[in-house]
Image (cartoon, rainbow, N blue to C red):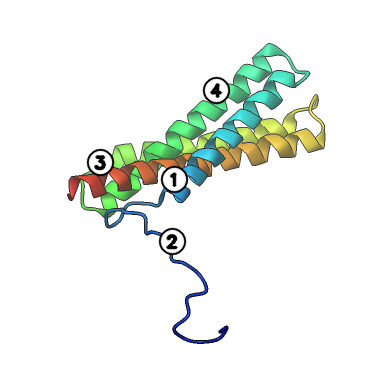
Amino acid sequence: MLGDKNEELFSEKPREKRRLGEPTAAFKGAAWGALLIGVASYLIGLYNAAMELNEKGYYIALLILGLYSAVSLQKAVRDRDEGIRVTNLYYGISWFALIAAISLMAIGLFNAGSIILSEKGFYGISFVLSLFAVVTVQKNVRDTEEANQDK
């Protein structure tokens, strides 16, 4: 009868076997999905944009610089936190590169006369989504690797 404590209303889902510290498959998939959506949206928007080829190249270069610098900075911050030696020069360059990429994107979009305001917002949001997602993917890759080493 409904309401009896011994009665199972819901069957238990078998637990996913993961190692301590390893992200779930759903979290890994969400991170990769966000990265693919962010980068693909950005690139499709650029492909369809009515701007000069040199402008498109500028925005592609900023995306590449931003993605690389975000991963590099995430690794440097985490290495320092875990006691792995990171030189101050590398740490500073990582911060500088990320700040430069974000600043150049903001300045470029602010000064772009050929892009309407909604497109500027689109590029800005897809850029930020891509940066956040690439940091999350890097973190997941590193956490998975560490969990596999602790077998």
Label 3 and label 1: CA atoms lie apart by 30 Å
Which residue lies under the disc numbered 4? 61
Which residue lies under the disc numbered 2? 13
Is disc 2 surrounded by few (<14), some (14 to 19) or many (20+) residues within 10 Å?
Answer: few
The three-letter code of the residue at mark 2 reads Lys
Q: In the image, what residue occupies the spot 44% across and 35% down? A: 69
Q: Earlier in the sequence, mark 3 or mark 4?
A: 4
Label 2 and label 4: CA atoms lie apart by 46 Å
The three-letter code of the residue at mark 1 reads Lys
Q: In the image, what residue occupies the spot 79% across and 28% down? A: 115
Residue 56 point in image, percent of width and height: 66, 19
Is disc 3 surrounded by few (<14), some (14 to 19) or many (20+) residues within 10 Å?
Answer: few
Which residue lies under the disc numbered 3? 87
Answer with the quarter of the image where residue 17 lies.
bottom left
Label 3 and label 2: CA atoms lie apart by 47 Å
Residue 37's disc is none
Residue 94 point in image, percent of width and height: 39, 38
24 lies above or below 37: below
Q: Earlier in the sequence, mark 3 or mark 1?
A: 1
Foreground label between 1 and 2: 2
Q: Which image quadrant: the N terminus?
A: bottom right
Q: Is residue 21 left or right of residue 133?
A: left
Label 1 and label 2: CA atoms lie apart by 20 Å
Q: Earlier in the sequence, mark 1 or mark 2?
A: 2
Residue 28's disc is 1
Q: In the image, what residue occupies the spot 57% across and 83% down? A: 2
The three-letter code of the residue at mark 4 reads Ala
The three-letter code of the residue at mark 3 reads Thr
